[in-house]
């Protein structure tokens, strides 16, 4: 869905100040002047020289406070952002609608200026939702059940274009001159840091973070096997047809890991996945590298997908091809996958003018595992917002169950941890009715020297508990190896 910019990679080295010496900018300031004293957000965007947004996050890191990163390298799209200018929270069943209402209000009053026409110019709302309506575990308290942020600064890379957006609260300025000065000063400050004229701190750790330990404890294995077998009994009793059960693996590290270092490894090894990182004001970081798109949304055009059914990668080309074939012909994996397609189609029906899907699943190969994958495209009716669709689709049976209402209470009963934001929707929305959300699997929560990672598996009637356990190990591998822990 990325909009390919055909302009040049390098922005001519005009100084920020001269880029704002235009009649359009003067006109913008005149309009803003009329709103002085209001609650509006003022947002100014301009292209900057090509630079890796993850590097920007490291360079502009203030060690404390809010950080956001999002990247899908194969789409040549990334967002880095820092410092929370405004935060929106909500909880409970109405959290999607509530966040939508709060964001709409901001959008109505926003005063945006850009030196380049682009669908990513302007305010972006960055955040996500917990899996269940509420989380009870204190570990997740600072994330809440729904949390979005308008950052003070945001850098977006879309193809060849890199955009820097700065946001301000108009209520903090007494005069338009003061605001104008602040805008120019902030752009100059950031551009100066990003010029990389001074050497960044070089990382020294070679054997990063490794401490002795074993995440595959006998206790964890046996409690998993019990839960899966109980789920299979419930399926045999017709309580539900499919349930996704997950487990957590907590590791203690020898030093506090730097989340951007973990993301840097993940994004290189999994370029067709979404790498994401959200560090909140409590200095906890939720991060991951997920292969699963929940939605990509541009005006009324929607992309979603069914991703469920897994097998390991082979060690050789022929072994790998054999594994793919096994996955394609496995009835158990086909069941797991078809529940997801069925649920997505049913749930989207009231919202769409047209829906199209792949005629049969294809294989999506990741470095650690391969999955069954069916892309789904829809054209939505008028006035549907991205969060209406997020609310409708979450959770798909790739992370929840089928039928959801029947399976839902058993997830809490059969898993002995709070999912928090694991498998919830994470992503971004913008002021131009675009947005993208991924399903936050292959993820973990990092705080100081403790990291907790999550992995789940779809359980159907013919699942085998031992095989599913091995699958969780495969799914944990990316995060653990990024910490040099496997
Ligand atoms: C729930 C997870 O994966 C889902 C996505 C793809 C394949 C899955 C599977 O084959 O079980 C799961 O439905 C996870 O990685 O934690």
Image (spheres, rainbow, N blue to C red):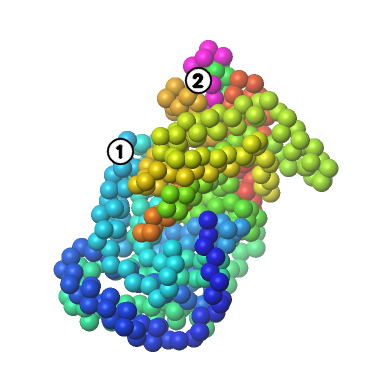
Residue 240: mark: 2
Q: Residues within 10 Å of mark 1 (few under 14, many from 20)?
A: few
- Residue 8 in percent (x, y) is at 56, 77
- Residue 372 in percent (x, y) is at 65, 38
- Is residue 242 rendered magenta in the image? yes
Residue 94: mark: 1
Local secondary structure at mark 1:
loop
The one of 264 and 113 positioned closer to us in this rendering: 113
Q: Is residue 315 left or right of residue 57?
A: right
Q: CA distance from mark 1 to mark 2?
A: 25 Å
- Residue 449 in percent (x, y) is at 50, 52
Query: Residue at point 38% right, 72% down?
Result: 114
Quarter of the image where one finds residue 51: bottom right
Could you tell me if residue 139 is visible in this image?
no
Q: Is residue 388 left or right of residue 452?
A: left
The reply to whether dot 1 and dot 2 touch (C-beta < 8 Å) is: no
Residue 227: mark: none
- Is residue 334 rendered magenta in the image? no
Query: Residue at point 45% right, 81% down?
Result: 192
Vertical order, 455 against 482 (above or below): above
Query: Of label 1 and label 2, which has the lower sequence position?
Result: 1
Query: Residue at point 37% right, 42% down?
Result: 388
- Residue 272 in percent (x, y) is at 62, 53
Query: Residue at point 28% right, 67% down?
Result: 111
Local secondary structure at mark 2:
loop
Q: Given the current orientation, which residue lies at the most extreme top position?
A: 237
Vertical order, 99 against 407 (above or below): below
Q: Which residues are magenta?
A: 236-245
Q: Given the current orientation, which residue lies at the most extreme front position?
A: 353
Q: Is residue 152 left or right of residue 423?
A: left
The one of 291 and 392 positioned closer to us in this rendering: 392
């Amino acid at each position: 869905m990325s909009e390919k910019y055909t302009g040049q990679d390098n922005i001519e080295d005009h100084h920020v100040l001269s880029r704002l010496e235009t009649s359009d900018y003067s006109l913008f300031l005149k309009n803003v002047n009329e709103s002085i004293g209001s609650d509006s957000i003022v947002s100014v965007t301009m292209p900057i020289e090509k630079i890796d947004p993850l590097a920007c996050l490291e360079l502009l890191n203030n060690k404390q406070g809010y950080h956001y990163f999002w990247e899908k390298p194969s789409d040549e799209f990334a967002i880095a952002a820092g410092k929370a200018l405004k935060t929106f929270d909500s909880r409970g069943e109405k959290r999607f609608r509530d966040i939508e209402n709060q964001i709409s209000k901001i959008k109505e009053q926003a005063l945006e200026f850009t030196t380049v026409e682009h669908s990513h110019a302007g305010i972006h709302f960055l955040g996500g939702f917990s899996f269940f309506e509420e989380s009870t575990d204190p570990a997740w308290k600072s994330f809440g059940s729904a949390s979005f942020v308008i950052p003070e600064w945001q850098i977006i890379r879309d193809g060849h274009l890199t955009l820097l957006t700065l946001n301000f609260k108009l209520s903090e300025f007494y005069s338009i001159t003061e605001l104008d000065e602040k805008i120019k000063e902030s752009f100059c400050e950031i551009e100066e840091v990003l010029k990389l004229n001074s050497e960044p701190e070089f990382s020294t750790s070679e054997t990063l973070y490794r401490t002795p330990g074993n995440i595959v404890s006998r206790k964890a294995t046996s409690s998993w096997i019990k839960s899966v077998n109980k789920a299979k009994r419930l399926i045999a009793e017709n309580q539900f047809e499919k349930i996704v059960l997950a487990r957590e693996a907590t590791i203690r590290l020898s030093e506090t890991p730097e989340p951007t270092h973990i993301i840097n490894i993940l994004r290189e090894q999994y370029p067709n996945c979404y790498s994401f990182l959200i560090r909140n004001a409590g200095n906890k970081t939720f991060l991951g590298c997920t292969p699963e798109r929940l939605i990509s949304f541009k005006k009324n055009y929607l992309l979603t997908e069914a991703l469920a059914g897994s097998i390991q990668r082979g060690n050789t080309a022929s072994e790998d091809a054999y594994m793919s074939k096994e996955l394609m012909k496995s009835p158990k994996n086909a069941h797991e996958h078809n529940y997801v397609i069925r649920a997505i189609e049913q749930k989207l029906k009231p919202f769409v003018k047209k829906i199209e899907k792949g005629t049969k699943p294809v294989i999506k190969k990741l470095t650690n595992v391969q999955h069954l994958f069916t892309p789904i495209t829809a054209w939505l009716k008028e006035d549907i917002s991205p969060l209406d669709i997020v609310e409708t689709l979450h959770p798909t049976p790739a992370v929840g169950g089928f039928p959801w209402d029947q399976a839902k209470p058993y997830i809490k009963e059969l898993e002995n941890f709070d999912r928090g934001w694991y498998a919830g929707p994470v992503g971004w929305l913008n002021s131009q009715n675009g947005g993208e959300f991924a399903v936050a699997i292959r993820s973990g929560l990092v705080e100081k020297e403790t990291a907790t990672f999550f992995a789940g598996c779809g359980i159907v009637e013919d699942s085998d508990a031992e095989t599913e356990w091995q699958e969780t190990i495969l799914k944990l591998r990316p995060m653990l190896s990024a910490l040099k822990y496997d």
